[in-house]
Amino acid sequence: MWLLKLNWKSFSLQSINARNPRCIPLALFSTIPPGLSPVLQELCNVVSNGLGSLDDLEASLDRFDASFTSSLVSQIIDSCKNEAPTRRILRFFLWSSKKLKCKLEDDDFNYAIQVFAEKKDLKAIDILVSDLNNEGREMKAQTFGILAETLVNLGREDDALGLFKNLDKFKRSHDSITVTAIVNALCSKGHARRAEGVVRHHKDKILGVKPCIYRSILYGWSEQKNVKESRRILREMKSVGIMPDLFCYNTFLRCLCEKNLKSNPSGLVPEALNVMMEMRSNRITPTSISYNILLSCLGGSRRVKESCQILKLMKRSGCSPDWVSYYLVARVLYLTGRFGKGNKIVDEMIGEGLVPDRKFYYDLIGILCGVERVNYALEMFERMKRSSLGGYGPAYDVLIPKLCRSGDFEKGRELWDEANRMGVQLQCSSEVLDPSITKVFKPTRKDDEVCTMSRTLVQEVKAVANGNKHKNKKKRKSAAPS
């Protein structure tokens, strides 16, 4: 869901360079931190900014007379990981392993694996994990956790489970940390059943982390929108003496609402309110996040009346709506053409003293432009400027082209000049202000469709009239004497 995952669709704030970046030397983009020793600086430049093939890189490294140490290798990887291609980092590490023979520490191998896992380089991961195994080195618990998460995220949950089963080959035992790591990784992508299989085989390892394990499994079932299994986990938690907390109930509420959104929209409000009643009976007070989960699904099914009622219910029940609550209600009002009510909701939020995030205004301005209500979008922008939030560039970038493509070049020029006076860097091109370049979109009446509908109605009326005449003739014939 948009609420729990915080997956806001925001406008890009990055500047666009008109020059071709391929024509600019890579060294100009160097992000190697300053203040490094000359030797370390030179090595980082060779790994990150050197030209030629990977064999050329290794030849360049062979020419260095400096003595390499284990700590120096890790420093170079740390300095280059955000800049150098992963293949160059891998070749440097393998070269270091050969040059130093057995002098590289287990920590260096673990750190390199973590870096490649974060970069999602499966080939490099496979090579280093194989080397770790062949050389009888130890895999740290943190390394396994990062590896498991990366593998599951990339769709290789079988490999993650295989690594977990063979941890003894890496001098790592199955303990509460590794069991929790694999369960969290599997459940993050909805593999709750496989996670429960791990738990069944290692019950004795989770005695101190049961609440965390149950929360992960509950989240895993909710990712599948499996209400039945999610409810089973809640009951099981209570049976073993673990009282579900606010996170657990919000997770179950999200699962229930998302399921109803697809299969039973009319059951959204009553079933969600039943869960909230259950929460209160267990001395857990629903928060604005709980209500926002419901509001988000109501907006997804365009249930305007219920959305407004839930917002009022929040206030009556003592749960103050936050700006996300007002956003969700205003959004569904605008999308369904209730612009006056939407403006009223936004003004009510401002009157309550709530200061929303910039994305609140970005999204609503985008919605209003999308439904061809630029005048209301301009009013929303004025509210944003009165709140002194800053970050007006993305709003200008949406409004100026929209105004010009709607034919209002004068207002578009006015906003352009205003942005320049304020020192706002715009992403849209000045060409949009030129009527000879910008194509104006003017909605036209579909007269042909109207005429077609009129002709169809006339034909239907005539058909009905002819049918009635035919029936009357039959009646007269049957009534005539034989």
Image (tube, rainbow, N blue to C red):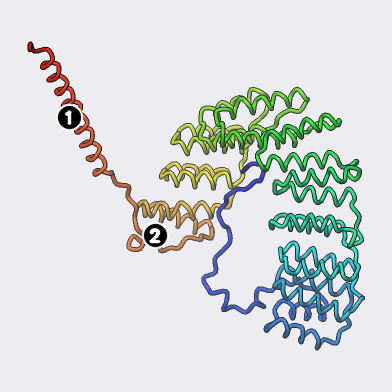
Quarter of the image that includes the C terminus: top left
Packing grade of label 2 (10 A; few <14, some 14-19, many >=20) is many
**Residue 397 located left or right of residue 219:** left
Q: Disc 2 marks which residue?
A: 433
Q: Position of residue 56 (x, y in %)?
A: 72, 85
Picture quadrant of residue 470:
top left
Q: Which of 217 and 91 is in front in this view?
A: 217
Q: In this view, does 223 lie above or below 399?
A: above
Q: Is residue 58 above or below residue 308?
A: below
Q: For numbered disc 1, what is the local secondary structure?
A: helix
Quarter of the image that includes the N terminus: top right
The amino acid beneath tag 2 is Leu
Q: Which residue is drawn at 84% across and 55% down?
A: 165
Q: Distance between the residues labelled 1 and 2?
A: 53 Å
Q: Are marks 1 and 2 in contact (CB under 8 Å)?
A: no
The amino acid beneath tag 1 is Lys
Q: Which of 231 and 30 is in front in this view?
A: 231
Tell me which numbered mark, 1 or 2, is placed earlier along the sequence: 2
Which mark is in front, 1 or 2? 1
Q: Where is residue 335 in the image (x, y as percent from the top left)?
A: 47, 39
Q: Is residue 145 above or below residue 459?
A: below
Picture quadrant of residue 353:
top right
Q: Which residue is drawn at 25% across and 37% down?
A: 453
**Residue 331 located left or right of residue 142:** left
Packing grade of label 1 (10 A; few <14, some 14-19, many >=20) is few
Q: Residue at x 54, y 43 (%)?
A: 386
Q: Disc 1 marks which residue?
A: 462
**How many numbered marks appear?**
2
